[in-house]
Amino acid sequence: MNAMIRPLAIALAGAGLTAVPLAAQNPATEDPASDAPPSDNRIIVTAKAAGAPMWTIETDKGAVILVGEIRAVPKSTPWFPDRLESATHEADRVIVRAAPKFSPGDVFRLLFRGGKFTKLPDKSVAADYLDDAQRARLARLEAEYDIDYDRRSFLMTGFDLLARRLDFDDETTKDATDIVKKAARKADVPITRPERFRGEDLLDNLAEAPPTSHIPCLEAAMSATEAGQAIIQKRGDDWRSFDIPAVMANPLEVALGTCWPWADDELGDEIRGQWVGMIADASQQAGVTLAVVPLRVLAEPDGVLDQLEAQNFLIGGPDWRGKATGSPEG
């Protein structure tokens, strides 16, 4: 059971259901002991000093700060979560991703229908769906790790390769969402979340997906695993240096972004639409909103940043598409 739930948790959490690093800046531009409310600019500077990539939308009433979050930042990646925590204390509101809503009934559904999620249907095997080259790649990984994936669903095989063989989420720091959520609760800063997907809907969506729909996930997970653990640190370093196109092209990030629910167009569109709506609403409110958004949701083609720009929001921050078409840094 644990082997089934852990990969699902990784996928759902990731869904959220470049400039010179700014860490050297001193966020304490005003007297920290002052009773005066912090200025919008001070909050922005404090947040940027954390060293995570972020974008700002300044409005007549205030500003929205978008923190581009990646899951499983290596402990060896130098960034400063305490400064993000300080910015959260001073913000007027925060937006963070929500966990899916699973009821006790959904848990029983998973227990009794687990084979439908974890196994290929009707006693079929991997070779029934993969071409010769794909099956040969999988066979090499099976031999390397002494494991049999022949009957396992391609989605679960992909998650097993990423979480257990590549071991991408070992020796990592706390996610930005956890840091901001805890700091907001401590400082009584209002928290807004996207509407949570019902566990029943997510499980039904997963159960109805044909095995072939998860072959791109399998291929991306095989590529990441074949590339080796060096890509884990490279992803963290590129994130820290605000090289967003490099992060998005990293085989690990590609694999995480290719697997369910991202491969499902309907779910992916709904996730992006929720974030765009919440950020647009926040731009109409006075003060500073700090939003922690999965980087892939922000920076993918036709993602949140592209959609906000299409709605004529002026976005300052790292280039997210490549220098030829990227937005100006701010």
Image (tube, rainbow, N blue to C red):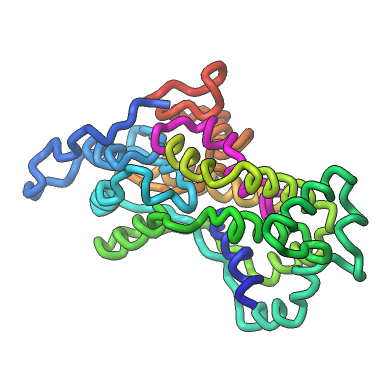
Q: Is residue 185 magenta?
A: no
Q: Where is residue 124 in the image (x, y as percent from the top left)?
A: 91, 65
Q: Where is residue 102 in the image (x, y as percent from the top left)?
A: 60, 74
Q: Is residue 247 magenta?
A: yes
**What secondary structure prevails in the magenta region?**
helix
Q: Is 105 on the left-hand or right-hand side of 282?
A: right
Residue 317 visible, this orientation: yes
The range drawn in magenta is: 240-264
- Residue sitting at x 7%, y 47%: 34
Q: Quadrant of residue 24?
A: top left
Q: Position of residue 223 (x, y in %)?
A: 68, 43
Q: Is 102 on the left-hand or right-hand side of 267?
A: left
Choose between 216 and 35: the one closer to the eye.
216
Q: Is 78 on the left-hand or right-hand side of 105?
A: left
Q: In the picture, which quadrant includes the C terminus?
A: top left
- Residue sitting at x 68%, y 83%: 108
